[in-house]
Amino acid sequence: MGEIILTMEGIDKTFPGVHALDKVSMDVRRGEVHALMGENGAGKSTLMKVLTGIYQKDAGTIVFEGREVRFASPREAQSAGIVIVHQELNMMGHLTVAQNIFIGREPRHGLLIDDASMNEEAAKLFAQLGIEIDPRETMSQLTVGKQQMCEIAKAISHEAKVIVFDEPSAALTDTEIDQLFRIIRDLRDRQYGIVYISHRMDEIKRITDRVTVMRDGQTVGTLVTAECTKDDIIHMMVGRVIFEEPKTQSRVPADAPVVLRVEHLNAGRMVRDVSFTLRKGEILGFSGLMGAGRTETARALFGADAKDSGDIYIDGEKVNIHSPKDAVRAGIGYLSEDRKRYGVVLKKNICENSTLACLQNYVKHGSLIDGEAERKVTQRMVDALKTKTPGVDQLVMNLSGGNQQKVVVAKWLISNSKILIFDEPTRGIDVGAKQEIYELMNRLVQEGKSIIMISSEMPEILRMSDRIIVMCEGKKTAEFDVSTATQEKIMNAATREIAV
Amino acid sequence: MKEALRKFKNLRFVRVIGFNRVILIAIIFLMYGLFTLLTPLLRNGSTFVNYNRVMSALNYAYFIGFMGLGVTFVIATGGIDFSIGPVMFCSALISGYCLTKFNLPLWLCIFISVGVGAVFGSIGGYFVAFRRLPSFITSLALMQVAKGVGSIFTKTQSVTWPSNDPATSWYRDLVKSSNLPVGFVILAVFAILCSIILYRTTAGRYMLCIGSNREAVRLSGVDTRRWEMLAYVLSGTLAGIAAIFYVGAYTTVQPGLGDTFNNEAIAACVMGGTSMAGGSASILGTVIGAIIVALMQEGILAMGFTISYQYVLTGLIVLCAVTADIMSRKRRN
């Protein structure tokens, strides 16, 4: 490890309603791989965005190569020598490898692009990295792993000194990961400073020299990787004080009937052989890190996306669900994590949104809508759920996040769903309204509904669930009764490495 | 001034028919006044105020109005239909050929005309709703097909519907009977029917919601494909009905034409307050829009300009109306 090349000190960043970074500090040395870890929403990405000029910090200092810097754009950070290799690759598939690497700064002969020297330069870069890629190949023809190599080559061509890798291994195969690690070690030996963001615990041990852990927008601490254990890191990641008491035991009697049984559900890469049961009156929590396949599981179950295989039983009877229509008929309601896109029709009023899932029950004379009955049932729901609105004619776009969520709940209650899937039920909802949503969910299960709750917030999972399923990379990796679940156990299962 | 405007906007009748529609009605009167003033100046000795001119403008408004009603449903779902003009001509050509060459009974030919429109609408609707093709491309392709099919069917001959024999020309009474504008009554009846479909039935509710947020509607368990397709079927069917009113007014149809009417019907629609972004639509606005388009064409001809000016103006109206729509949506957000 060489001298310190980059220091971030007391970085502060606030978004409306969220203190995303709270006096965060971290330093990077030449010739080290420095892991940055933390749960979803801990602030890793925000910190990296501040570093690379995508966001502007509110307070704090960034010292790079001994001078204080302030980047107004990713371009400035790039030309100073700090480059980020994103998880989603920013490549143009129809261009060649060399064209992608040199985009915006193509070598030229007068007005024309000098293809020959561009390809030559690219080939030199790849030779440096010790990888074999033809610069004339079309980008979309390459595997994801090779595309990532191209991103790295591009970073080096910018004369980067610090390279940030944002979950680089998420989409790679084992051999590709080995190759990536060989390149990263090589870069380290050539005195680059490397920041490595990942959730995979074993990779941290394999490749990194130091690890900095963040939690809830703060730095918890920095450790030398060789001197710590996986448990140490997990403890730092989740070791918060939870103000809300977690539920100590399930309220669901052991003999409560099973309302939903899912067997060997498969859908694409993100849902692999998932099986579980849901009992009447139960809140079943789905925990895991981002991209673990929980939303995909819910969507496949609900018929929103096609499933490859798997059986679904409701009240013991097998049901065929090929579309949301089938799912709604079977008594399932889905409350999406992205309410504005998938939950509500913003430009329509509360009434129109509330009856959308069962409009056929509010008609008279054939197919004329019975406006009065519709308003009546909506008003009843507005009262029961305590939705704050001047009236049922209010457009949904004028409601707060919490009240929009209540409109979606009303939609599924009016259509008489027995099973409700809450996907991140409190995302984008302020603290006071959160409490209300929790109370509402508890009331619903008391009234005999059953709830699947997907949540990335550990306190929410522990507080609300009767039983907890943990997913990682498309598979179910653990199932706990709430009485035996701890943050450490859940995080362990969520970061478990699975042989592909 | 602002206060007065606010008060005016809050008047009961303004709220019922919409501020935009009130403005449009005012524009009709302004245009009428303008043409009355300018026509004698530009063309010595001729006047605009004249019963025949009103009837002639109405003749034009009917078929544009029927097409506009249809395309309103499509635009409400967030799509567009550029095929309606040629589909209308194709309907009129095929049914007219059946009437004059095969001597089929008139009622059957009217039925054929509506049927041809419905078939085109169904094909377009199928590709847009079930195969997820962009409505823009689909309707442009169908526009070509409709032009071609009409020409092939009539062996590239124009078709003139009979206008003297009472047994085969009673269709003309649908447009005008003993100098009374019957067509206006029929258009009004259809406008009311369309309003009921759009605002009071589940089908209309789904179409409008699809236009705002298709995915949210689908995830509410609604088969969005079916309802989206229905919008195109209605659009085609109403183009088939428009064909009867076109020949009722003008009797002769030529093959390979009709696309200029698309833009006029769409212009009627967007100036009437139907949002190109989908999700909100005004049937009344479309009818008023059709009258404005028709009056504009009558005025242009009366003042001695060629029809080419009409094309320029319709194009500009679409640009202005859509810009206004986008601006008002931005302001609201």
Image: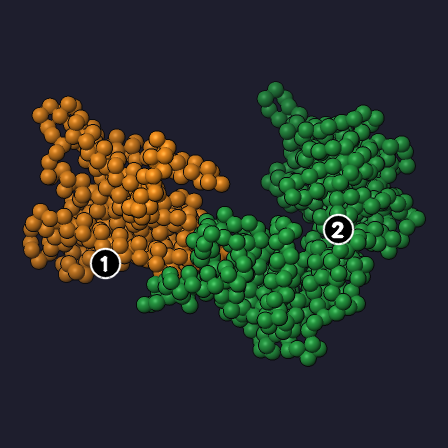
Chain colours: A green, B orange
Q: Give the residue drawn at x 14%, y 42%.
A: B55
Q: Which mark is residue B112?
A: 1
User: Residue A189, how many percent across, how many down?
Assistant: 87, 37
What number of labels is visible?
A: 2
Q: Nearer the viewer, mark 2 or mark 1?
A: 2
Looking at the rendered image, the quarter that the N terminus of chain A falls into is: top right
Furthest residue in direction top, as rendered: A110
Residue at x 35% of width, y 55% of height:
B199
Q: CA distance from mark 2 to mark 1?
A: 66 Å
Q: Which of B315 and A159 lies nearest the eye of the viewer? A: B315
Seen in the image, is A435 located left or right of residue B27?
A: right
Residue A2, placed above or below residue A208: above
> Where residue A39 is drawn, which disc sits there?
2
Question: Residue at 50% across / 48% down in the picture?
Answer: A397
Q: Residues within 10 Å of mark 2 (few under 14, many from 20)?
A: many
Residue B311, relative to residue A17: is it above or below?
above
Subunit under mark 1: B
- Please name the amino acid that badge 2 sits on: Glu
For disc 2, the chain is: A
Q: Amino acid at mark 1?
A: Ile
Name the quarter where the C terminus of chain A is drawn.
bottom right
Residue A430: image location, x then y, percent: 63, 50
Task: Say which element carries label 2.
Answer: loop
